[in-house]
Image (cartoon, helix red, strand yellow):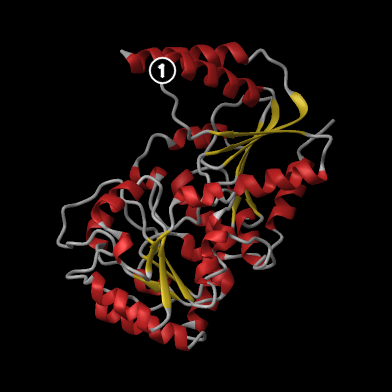
Amino acid sequence: MKDLIYKILDIFLKLLVIIIPVKKNKILFLSKVSTGSNTTIVAARIKEERPELTIVEMDRGYKFEGIRTWLKEKIRLYYHALTSKIIVTTHGPLIKTHKNININLWHAFPTKKTGLMLDDISVRRIQNSTDYFLSYSTFSSVLLNSRNGIKGSKYIELGSPRNDYLFENNRHKFNYLDKYRGSKIVYYLPTYREQEHEIKFPSKYLRFPLFNFEKFNNFLRDNGINFIVKFHPKEEHKMLNSIDFAKYSNIILLKEEYLDEGFTDFYEILPHSDILITDYLSIYADYLLLDKPMIFTPTDIEEYNQDRGLLLEPYEFWRPGPICMRQENLQEELLKCLNDNNYYEKEREIIKMIFHKYDDGKSTERVIDFISSKLSF
């Protein structure tokens, strides 16, 4: 019953606000993520450079309790959406008419299946309401369209604004990392699993068979390595319940709240690292711009392919770094990467050339120029 009420109210609001006139100097930025968002850096820069524009930023991912609060926020959201000349989003369009322009900056390089590749009907909103879709390159546009199925002319190959942070190594100081400066820093960023199998790994943290935390922590300590893990916000609480991070001196959990408290985007501190480790997360495509070693750990790839699936196969070809399936192998490859920055250098360069049209830290500038070209007043 509650869902039905929400649906009816949602339709009513869309019909109601459609008669509200658009303000030609107004831009709405809608995001669903608190870090790694393409809208944050663009909105901040426009505020600095174009004070004559009205900029509204809203968190589309926030969940409200109760119909009254939900209705109040929905009215506010749709009002700003329908009165904005341009609506800039990270997770697809919300609502628009012929009077609005929707620019989808998206939130990741397309390495996983979604949309049309999984027969997801939600892609219809992108097909029906997207005016422009941000892309990294021609190759990126091809991958995106395997999932979106929109006109090729809608893709704008300008690069990802959040990646501009990667070119500003000394721009932001994050106090949480101060105590680790001077040591080797390894980031471990596992993919969020919407469906978690009861599989053969006793540790869901690294998903290695027979993983020994004490042994791994001793290895890290002996080699001056701090192993910093960043989980997806939806997965943090599960990992906190299964792992006592306080027991390990060199295995550190970076919570989302630490970034929020420090007003820090994770991409601002991503350059403060020596190695990236991930399994299927597309952030490795962005990390290529740093030209630093990467290690890949697809220890549950069969199960992951059953649930979601990857666009780029074979896995080994598209991942420019060593692939580790056991703890001993991981420790060996960590030392190789730390001792030789040129390890897999050629492979990284080839994949970077395919993934990225630009390697200059000016994607925000290009996106702002594009947005400005669509304003007419």
Q: Amino acid at mark 1?
A: Gly
Q: Is residue 99 above or below residue 332?
A: above
Residue 304 figure quarter: bottom left
**Where is residue 296 drawn, in percent x and y?**
37, 71
Q: Quadrant of the N terminus?
A: top left
Residue at figure coordinates x 78%, y 36% from the top left? 375
Q: Residues within 10 Å of mark 1 (few under 14, many from 20)?
A: few
Residue at figure coordinates x 39%, y 47% from the top left? 114
Q: Quadrant of the C terminus?
A: top right
**Where is residue 154 drawn, in percent x and y?**
62, 44
Residue corresponding to mark 1: 66
Q: Is residue 48 above or below residue 172?
A: above
In screen coordinates, is 50 left or right of 226?
right
**Where is residue 249 drawn, in percent x and y?**
36, 70
In screen coordinates, is 248 left or right of 57?
left
Q: Is residue 141 above or below residue 331?
A: above
Task: Inspect this view and state whether residue 138 appears.
Answer: no
Residue at figure coordinates x 70%, y 53% from the top left? 364
Q: Secondary structure at mark 1?
A: loop
Task: Inspect this view and state whether residue 318 appears.
Answer: yes
In depth, the one of 113 and 106 nearer the eye is 106
